[in-house]
Image: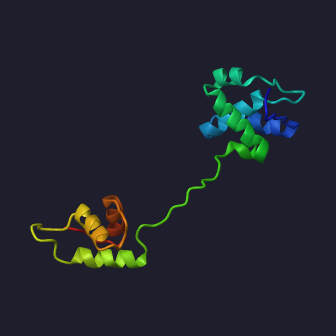
Amino acid sequence: MKKYIIKLSPEERAELTAVANKQRVDAQAKLRAQVFLASDASNNGPAKTDRIIASEVGLTVQTIERLRAWATEVGPIAALKRRPSTRVFTRKLDGRGEAKLIVLAKQQPPVGHNHWTLQLLADRLVELRIVDSIDDNTVDRTLKKMNLSLT
């Protein structure tokens, strides 16, 4: 038995049908609209099982269940969009770290090297305990942001 049941109002059904039939629409939104229309348990809906819907649209049963749960939580129209990300991005280099990187990049490279490489700079930042760890791509992006070149 379904835990999350979707019952669409005539307005929601009309809007979802419009999204499902549009040519120029986000593929994920179109797919979700098709799922919600197929799982509609109202008087006008087909109320198909998750297995049938999954085979028709090419998704797994678990994905159909998650989509229905999301739609009952926020509404089927709002569920056409992706969930907001909960990931928190923390910067490796703050203003002081960037300043130290710039000073470091302008200094003479270590003995045995003709010039600084991104990896050498990253390793040196860790050595100086400016950061715990850092990728050379982060060093590259920071230098580009400051219009600095290693050559």
Res 92 seen here: yes
Residue 98: image x %, image y %?
36, 75
User: In which quadrant of the rendered view does residue 53 lie?
Assistant: top right
Q: How is the image coloured?
A: rainbow
Residue 14 in the image: above or below residue 147: above
Residue at the location (66% across, 27% down)?
61
Residue 139, percent from left and from top: 33, 65
Name the residue located 66 percent from the left edge and 21 percent from the top edge: 56
Q: Quadrant of residue 51?
A: top right
Q: Nearer the viewer, residue 88 or 106?
A: 88
- Residue most extreme to the right: 43
Taking depth in this image into account, of 96 and 1 the one nearest to the observer is 1
| Residue at the left extreme of this rendering | 112
Image coordinates for residue 112, horizontal then vertical, percent: 9, 67
Tell me if 96 is positioned left or right of 75 in this view.
Answer: left
Quadrant where the image shows the C terminus: bottom left
Q: Name the residue at 68% across, 32% down.
A: 64
Q: In this rendering, is residue 35 above or below 135?
A: above
Q: Quadrant of the N terminus?
A: top right
Residue 21 seen in this snapshot: no
Q: Position of residue 16 (x, y in %)?
A: 76, 37
Question: How many badges with numbers are in the image?
Answer: 0
Task: Say which quarter of the image contains residue 44.
Answer: top right
138 up-or-down from 40: above or below: below
Between 134 and 38, the one lying in front of the other is: 134
